């Protein structure tokens, strides 16, 4: 059972602009059990029906940096975060599936680079 007072406190603190890290700290200092705090945050966590939606909590400093970066790129904050994730995924794919040239295969055969050898 979730403590309704705790849920109400978290909602009000979020409305006042506090991030989740700054909300947890005083609750723990005032003796609230960590499991009750986590249950309250889990209760407030948005529930999405679709797989393509992601919810993240960022500390205030990181959020300000992302907002400035989004402004410089003429994007909204969600667009900026989506762009960062998309670019990261594309860069990883490029590195993972980079095909070697024929000359490189020949050179790699004689290369001193460490190779995984079957034992």
Image (tube, rainbow, N blue to C red):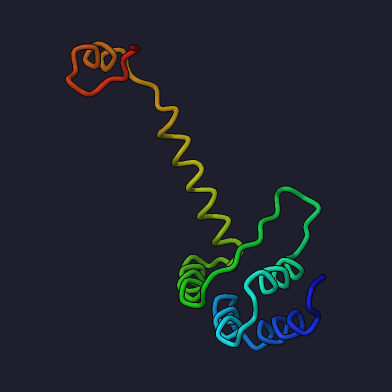
Indicate the quadrant containing the C terminus: top left, top right, bottom left or bottom right.
top left
Residue 107 vertical position relative to residue 18 in the rendered view, above or below: above
Nearest to the observer: residue 50 or residue 87: 50
Residue at horizontal 57 percent and vertical 86 percent from the top: 26
Coordinates of residue 48 in the picture (x, y in percent): 78, 57
Q: In the displayed structure, does residue 89 sit left or right of residue 37?
A: left
Q: Is residue 71 left or right of residue 34?
A: left
Vertical order, 6 against 93 (above or below): below
Please state which of residues 60 and 98 is positioned toward the viewer in this rendering. 60
State whether residue 39 is above or below residue 98.
Answer: below
Q: Residue at x 44, y 34 (%)?
A: 94
Task: Where is residue 58? Give x, y as percent.
Answer: 54, 69
Q: Position of residue 91 (x, y in %)?
A: 44, 41
Q: Is residue 111 above or below residue 51?
A: above
Q: Position of residue 29 (x, y in %)?
A: 55, 85
Snapshot quadrant of residue 57: bottom right
């Amino acid at each position: 059972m979730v403590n309704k007072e705790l849920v109400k406190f978290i909602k009000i603190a979020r409305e006042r602009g506090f991030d989740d890290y700054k909300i947890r700290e005083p609750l723990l200092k005032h003796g609230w059990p960590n499991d009750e705090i986590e249950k309250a945050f889990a209760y407030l966590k948005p529930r999405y029906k679709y797989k393509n939606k992601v919810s993240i909590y960022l500390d205030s400093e990181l959020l300000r940096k992302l907002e400035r970066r989004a402004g410089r790129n003429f994007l909204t904050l969600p667009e900026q975060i989506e762009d960062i994730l998309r670019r990261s995924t594309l860069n990883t794919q490029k590195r993972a599936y980079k095909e070697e040239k024929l000359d490189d295969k020949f050179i790699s055969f004689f290369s001193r680079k460490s190779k995984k050898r079957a034992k």
